[in-house]
Amino acid sequence: MTLRRRLSVASSLALALAAPTGCAPSAVDDGRGFSGPGVEIQAAALNLEGVGDVVWDLEVLSGDAGSGTVFQRRITSSGYGDSAGSASFVGPCDAGAGANPNTVKVWVVGVYDQDVASADAGSFAYGDPSGVTGAALAFQNPTTPGAAGALTRTFACVEGTDVAVQFDVALMRPAQQGFFDIAVNFNNIFCSAKLDCCDDGDSSGTCASPGEDLRLLFDASGARARTMVLGFACTAGTGDGRATSLYMDDLAFDCSDPASGFAADFTISPAGVLGNQCSAGSLAGCGAVDQLTATLADTYLYQVAVFRGDELVQSEGVAANKVYWNVALGVKGTIGACELRTRATADDPDNDLDGLVDGTLAAGAVYPFVTWQANLGACAEEPLSFDGTTDVRTAYSQTGGGADTFGYGFAPGLPAAPVCALPCEHGGSCTAPDTCTCLDGFGGAQCQNITVASSCKALHDGGVTQSGVYTLDPDGAGVLASFQAYCDMETDGGGWTMCWTDNGRVHMRSEVTYSASFPYGTDGYRSDCRNIPFTEVLYVDEAQLVPASRYAWFSRDTPGALVAGTAAADWNRTGDASGTFTGHGAAAAASYSFQLLFCDDVWMQTGLFISGYTVYQSSLCWKGCGYWCYDTTSAYFRPDGDYDPDSGSFHGAAFNQNGHTNLPVKLLSVGIR
């Protein structure tokens, strides 16, 4: 599912690393303050609203273990950038023997409300802010003071080559906009979250007092019963035109032994239709519940409800579009044995540069999210804590991590849907988190593999555009064997299963075996077009090179597909069994409709035989394989099907010419779609 209008981003720290040509020290430093290989470090475009300055500590180390210190420096955005977070600094790197890889370390020292002068910034101190003089703004730091607390990247310092190293960093700050209890600012995306296990009216921090249970959902008896509510809401900023996307994982429950290490017994999807997800009192078979072990959700829950949407609210007197995603849990008395875990985040789809794209965090991106980790036997009212003191707290992804995908996404105007980190190919659908459901004929995790399809059209619908020989199996796992056929993926958009090529009679019911000795387009090519539903027939005059004269195709005028089956009853019927067809390509100029015959009788073996639906004796006449309504005017499309080539009267092949006569031999190909 794509929820973004463009790539969404908060803030980034970009480092471009360069080693000028020549590793030996130079007498000229080009005004950089040093000679030899260099590293250009760019702290790019944080653009933090309401921020006067950001202070950074930078360090470059050399060697596998980072044992050699190349340089250390403290810089400010105001001194080396735009005062709103962006900065650039050039320092040395080490391209000497055994020096690679080099390691860049970055600490966010602090965020300040005014410019910090160089003299007030202090010296490099592994992220320790104590040496800075200035009014600090509160934020949650993805780094911690000390050598081990930095964001790190490795790179190769190369002579004469620029090396780019990118840090994507989004910072969380306390927000004044609290939709539920408390909010944080994901670098100008304002979010709030909570878990209400009860209404803690006496502020005891427990749900032990009488009357504190929330009673929202209805149990099997029809009475409101005990309910817990997980809530998440965000806005990308003020202004009713601002868009916000939310992402959330499955709610995971460990009810068997969470103390020995969390292992989910069952999960609940937050992406279902709005309202109740299950039959009250029975979660067995509920589509929102994925049962992972023998510990049943029914033992602990009687209902699940989901609520999503958006609403216009006022934030400090300015309009803001709040997007919310709430899950209500109808809980039984046994719920105290369970631990609940999930996480969620938000994205501004009008911002281009963060590491979160369509619900997937890029490898190495530093991006904030909210986590829920609650003992449901001990929780009460659990607001979002900025300092990690409650069961609902903020966290960061880290530079050392790989790509990470949230389970589901939601944005106003779009339904909640699962997220697949890699797109499903060939028309496949993302039907569960990181799970693609493939169209007929495709397989693999992303439906990237062509397997066995029911027809060439099924392959074409899945995105296959290369004409060639493919393996088909019309009934899938049924009794019919698979076979090979040539697929024309170009003519009139493609998707044609080509049945035969011949300049004589065609026994379409029995001559069905493909042979590499008779490739498509040569006399003798055959494949099995029986049991493939179709609504269109293609004729190809192989002697013609001009497309307008080479191809004629016919589309059925009434809904429903036809099948050239294996039973005798499927063949040699009159044209009314198939209905009328409209001609296209070389047959487009006809002023009449066409009719289709399936012919394989003792006199006429023509396979799929197309001719005009024209008047005979004052009435429109349906033809038969042995009776052609004395039609000597309409265009025919038929091979040389006469049983007796010596005494017959209808030899030769017809392509867009009347065939109620003898004609020359002509090489034709026929396909269906």
Image: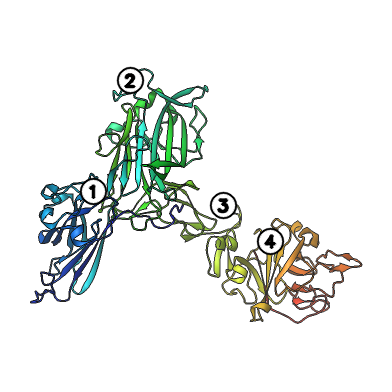
Residue 671 in the image: state x and y as whole percent.
Answer: 65, 68
Residue on which disc 3 sits: 477
Badge 2 amino acid: Ala
Task: State the mark number for residue 208.
Answer: 2
Q: Position of residue 293 (x, y in %)?
A: 40, 35
Distance, label 1 to label 2, CA atoms, is 37 Å
Q: Secondary structure at mark 3?
A: loop
The one of 522 and 533 positioned closer to us in this rendering: 533
Closest to the observer, 427 or 599: 427
Residue in the foreground of this view, choosing between 328 and 50: 50
Asked whether the residues under the numbered discs 3 and 4 touch, taking CB atoms below 8 Å apart as contact, a structural biologist would say no
The residue labelled by disc 4 is 535
Q: Is residue 310 left or right of residue 473?
A: left
Q: Are marks 1 and 4 in contact (CB under 8 Å)?
A: no
Q: Earlier in the sequence, mark 3 or mark 4?
A: 3
Which mark sits nearer the N-terminus, 1 or 2?
1
Query: Is the residue under label 4 in contact with that under label 2 (CB below 8 Å)?
Result: no
For the residues labelled 3 and 2, the Cα–Cα distance comes to: 58 Å
- Dot 1: within a 10 Å radius of its alpha carbon, few (fewer than 14), some, or many (20 or more) residues? many
Q: Is residue 363 above or below residue 258?
A: below
**Mark 3 vs mark 4, CA separation in Å:** 24 Å
Residue at (32%, 28%) from the top-left corner?
379
Which mark is first along the chain, 4 or 2?
2
Residue 567 in picture, x, y percent from top left: 72, 57
Amino acid type of the residue that numbered disc 3 sits on in the rendered structure: Ala
Element at badge 4? loop
Instruction: Categorize mark 2 by other alpha carbons within 10 Å: few (<14), some (14-19), many (20+).
Output: some
**Disc 3: CA contacts within 10 A as few (<14), some (14-19) or many (>=20):** few
Residue 83 picture location, percent across and down: 23, 57
In the current view of this chain or complex, which residue is farthest to the front? 317
Above or below, comparing residue 146 to residue 490 in the picture: above
